[in-house]
Image (cartoon, rainbow, N blue to C red):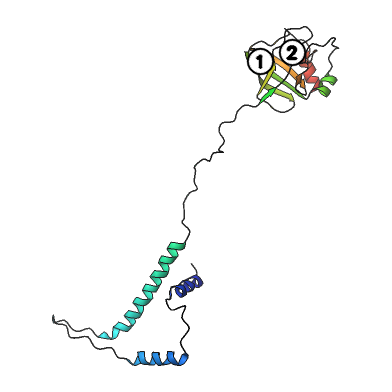
Amino acid sequence: MTDDDLRATLRRADPAASLPPLPSARVDHLLEQTMATPFADASPATDGRAATPSRWRRPALLAAAAAVVLAGAGIGWLTLRTPYTDSPSTTAGPGSAGPASPSVTRLTGAGIAAKCVEPTAQVLASRADLAVAATVRDIAGDTVTLQVTHVYKGTDADLIEVPQAPGASEGLMGSGSFEAGRKYLVAASEGSILTCGYSGEADAPGLAGLYEAAF
């Protein structure tokens, strides 16, 4: 609190602040009358101690009045000041984030093409918007879940879900179907798996080299 704040508080604590000021002549008269009024000496003490002169009373009363005003101002300041807290609240709100869930990309089967041409790195690079290395984590019914181990192209994903299509020599390279625990290279375009030599078992002849050349 600054000196100006304290003066303003004292003025607000003055019970006569709202009254109009007295005329200067009236003030001079009251001042002269107050200064001319003597204080009576204290009566002699009855227990034998020396009587204390009464002339100390005026400064003592003035000091007491000032102390009362200052105390009232201090109480008002303590009441109006903003409470202080030594640490922010740590209560979590309803929107607090918990453990992040793995991101999942779902692909569809491309079906069996009537005739496949020899795959090339140029076609793979231009057609595929997603290409990953992944391991089959589990197979539930017709849905295969693969754990992504490397992203060649596209948005990072933790898991990929693909349908389990019937085996076909011109579908996935290798056995033609997904098997639990095996590693695969999977390419897709607009959510559909690219087959015909572009997706299959990671150790299928020529597939890993095709991915390295394309990406």
Give the vertical position of 29 relative to 110 (above or below).
Answer: below
Query: As drawn, is 147 to the left or to the right of 131?
Result: left
Give the vertical position of 93 relative to 158 (above or below).
Answer: below
Q: Residue at x 35, y 78 (%)?
A: 63
Residue type of the residue flagged with mark 2: Gly
* Disc 2 to disc 1, C-alpha distance: 16 Å
Residue 202 or 173: which is nearer the viewer?
173
Residue 200: which numbered mark, if any? Answer: 2
Q: Secondary structure at mark 2?
A: strand
Q: Secondary structure at mark 1?
A: strand
Q: Position of residue 196 (x, y in %)?
A: 80, 12
Give the vertical position of 110 relative to 129 (above or below).
Answer: above
Query: As drawn, is 9 to the left or to the right of 134?
Result: left
Badge 1 density bin: few <14, some 14–19, many ≥20, Cα 10 Å: some
Q: Position of residue 49 (x, y in %)?
A: 16, 81
Q: Position of residue 182 (x, y in %)?
A: 66, 12
Q: Are marks 2 and 1 in contact (CB under 8 Å)?
A: no
* Residue that label 1 marks: 143
Q: Residue at x 43, y 62 (%)?
A: 79
Q: Position of residue 45 (x, y in %)?
A: 16, 83
User: Which numbered mark, 2 or 1, is in the foreground of this view?
Assistant: 1
* Quadrant of res 50: bottom left
Query: As drawn, is 6 to the left or to the right of 186?
Result: left
* Quadrant of res 28: bottom left
Residue type of the residue flagged with mark 1: Thr
Which mark is first along the chain, 1 or 2? 1
